[in-house]
Amino acid sequence: MLPLIITVVAGLAGYFLARNFVRHRLRFVDAIYSPLAPLLAGVAAAMIVWPLALLPFLKVATAAVFGIGVGLGTASGARILRRGEGHQRLTP
């Protein structure tokens, strides 16, 4: 049961961290609007976390779910920026 909880938390953490990072840090980067950006971010995140699969409670599926979460979070953050909801305007 514990590995399942860790996997779900890793997926959710990857999603929310990536979405907030895209919304706040990458809002001026044009490459984030590319259709390949979420795929590349997800694969890179999964490859970075992959060595942690050697730990007893983490499996390869945890790294894959984390990568999927990062990819979906990146796509969600880019969609929010495309709509113009990612920033607030200053009023004089």
Image (tube, rainbow, N blue to C red):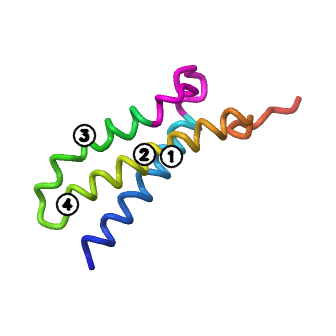
Q: What amino acid is found at the position of numbered circle 2 in the picture?
A: Val
Give coordinates of residue 4: x percent, y percent.
30, 71
Give the image location of residue 41, x and y in percent.
40, 35
Q: Is residue 80 left or right of residue 43?
A: right
Q: Quadrant of the N terminus?
A: bottom left
Q: Residues within 10 Å of mark 2 (few under 14, many from 20)?
A: many
What residue sits 26% from the left and 58% below the top? 61
**Separation (CA) of disc 3 from disc 2:** 12 Å
Report if the CB atoms under discs 2 and 1 are less than 8 Å apart.
yes
Q: Do the residues bearing badges 2 and 4 touch, measured as CB atoms within 8 Å?
A: no
Residue 86 lies in what quarter of the image?
Answer: top right
Q: How far apart in space, not on screen, are marks 3 and 4 (Cα)?
A: 13 Å
Q: Which residue is mark 4?
A: 59
Q: Which residue is mark 1?
A: 73
Q: Which residue type does callout 1 highlight? A: Gly
Q: Which residue is the site of mark 2?
A: 70
Indicate the amino acid at tag 4: Lys
